[in-house]
Structure formats: structure tokens, C-alpha cells
Amino acid sequence: MTSVTILQDSACDDAKEPFSSYQIDIPDVKVVKADLADESMTAATVQGLLDGASFDYIWDNASKGAKGSGKAIIDCASLWSSKLLCYVSSAGVYLPADEFPMPETTPVKETAGQVEYERHALESGTPFCSFRPQYIYGEKSNKWDYIDWYFDRIVAGAPLPIPSPGSQKVSLTNSADVASLLASVLNDEKAAAEQVYFNCGTSNLVSYDEVASMCAEAAGLSAKIEHYDPELGKAKFPFRLTDFYVAPDMATSKLKWEGPTCNLKDDLGWYYESYKARSKTVDLSVDDDVLAKASAA
């Protein structure tokens, strides 16, 4: 019999997605809350919280490093002789690159917490793999900043300061596709542990300007794009100033993942409705400063 237990940070708001859906959408799920920011947490602490239960498969989507709960989860995987520990890292660990899409061999920030977690997990000897997602959105996601940046300005009738030339590519991935990719390790857990690192993102690329145009179309408004020299600042832009994207080729070849089923353009309809339902105050003063510098240059 398969059972699912979620060790959830007590700081999470049960009234918000995805936390509000856990015990509704997942059959026979058990949610156990704990302070995952507590650096004194140990494997014994986790085992106590879980009433001594053990697990064959672990997906760690919370740990930011190899201390506290991160180390405790890795140690538990070893104690339980788990079949596979899957870690959700980030493509943000990659150093600035010249090759796109960035392969899993792209040099990483060695002192990043996620890299330290990966290193400790490998040293533990537990079958392990790490996924490196970037720029996630979705109905079951609590991350809205990337696409909201566009709608904030389009709805306000304000300019969208986009770093020149605006043709930089980005991969925005629906959380449903991320979830199916993470689950694909069960297709071949041996291959997952042998490969270790997997980029996690859609293969459907869009440019910064294209995102603006699609958002404007979804809102039935116009997008006032104003390109500026990146040396003048970032204007709170949600993406890198240059190309920065990965491809899921390794997951499709090694894990038999069938690829993304969601498309950003199609998703922007429901996304815009959710945007309108969320009241917010937006400060565009940094945008104004950057655009003023651009016009004076």
C-alpha cells in the first residue's frame, strides 16, 4: 500500500495554495508540520515527528542547504535505506554561461546552499538525484512574481522597462509540468541516481518581449515596451539581463519524461483572472528612475 506523508514547514499558510489543497487533492495524505528553519533539527527529530515511520522515496522541496532539516532529511534517507532521495535545487546555482540551453555540466556556485546539499547527499551514499528548475508558475504554485511583473505595468498603463534587446530567451514552466518531471524518477530510479543532475523546465522558450505581448493580449490591453541599456540598472526586472534558460533533454532521455503539457500562452487566460483577484500595491519608482536615465543617455 502506498502512503504519502508531507513534512510541511509550520510557517506555510494553510489558506493559500498549494498548501490548502494537500488534504483535498491527495488521497490518504498525512501532513506533519515542523519548523524547518530550525537548524538544530536532526534525523532523530524527524523520526520523532513521523512516529518512527520510514519511506522508500523522498522528495525534498524545502531544504536550502545541508544544515538543520536539510542534513536531517539526508541522514534519514540513509537510516531508512531509501530507494531514492530527490532534491529540488535551482537553476539559479549555475554561474553565468555562454552555452544555451545550459547543460547540467554548467559550472555552479560552489558555496550555494543547494550545491552543499547535493554534495552532502552524494557523500552519504544514498541513491540521490537533484532537479534544477527555474521560473515556475502555476495554479498550485505560490510563486507569482515573474508574470505579475508584466501585468502590473500593463494594467497600470505604465511602460515595461525591458533590458535590451528584449529577444533574450526564457523558459517559464507550469508547476504541473515540474511535478510530472519530478515524478518521472519512478520510471527508472536507477537511471535517476546514475545521472544525478537534471535540468527542470519546459522546452517551450519565449523572449522577454513575447511575454509582454502575450500578457497584453490576455488582458485585452496594450504593452508599452521600452528597452533600456542594462548598465543603467535592472528596474526590478524578474529575469536575468541576458539569456538564461535550461532544457529538459536529460530528463526526457534518461527518465522517459514525455515533456511539458502546458503552454504559457494558453495559461495566461486563467493566470490573468487570478491576477485580478489578488489585490496588491505596486511601486514603480525604480522603473521611473531607470527610464529617466535611459532618456537622458
Image: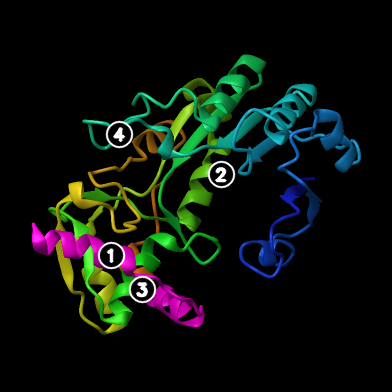
- The tag earlier along the polypeptide, 1 or 2, is 2
Q: Residue 129's image quarter?
A: top right
Image-based side of 165 in relation to 210, left or right: left
**Which range of residues does the magenta coloring cover?**
269-297
Q: Is residue 125 visible?
A: no
Q: Is residue 272 magenta?
A: yes
Image-based side of 64 in relation to 77, left or right: left
Q: Does 123 sit above or below residue 184? A: above
Residue behind mark 3: 152
Of marks 1 and 4, the one in the foreground: 1
Residue behind mark 2: 183
Q: CA distance from mark 1 to mark 4?
A: 29 Å
Extreme left residue here? 297
Image-based side of 176 in relation to 49, left or right: left
Which class describes the residues within 10 Å of circle 1: few (<14), some (14-19), or many (20+)?
Answer: many
- The tag earlier along the polypeptide, 1 or 4, is 4
Q: CA distance from mark 2 to mark 3?
A: 34 Å
Residue behind mark 1: 287
Of marks 2 and 3, the one in the foreground: 3
Question: Mark 4 belongs to which amino acid?
Answer: Met
Q: Secondary structure at mark 4?
A: loop
- The tag earlier along the polypeptide, 3 or 1, is 3
Residue 85 on image: x %, y % = 64, 31
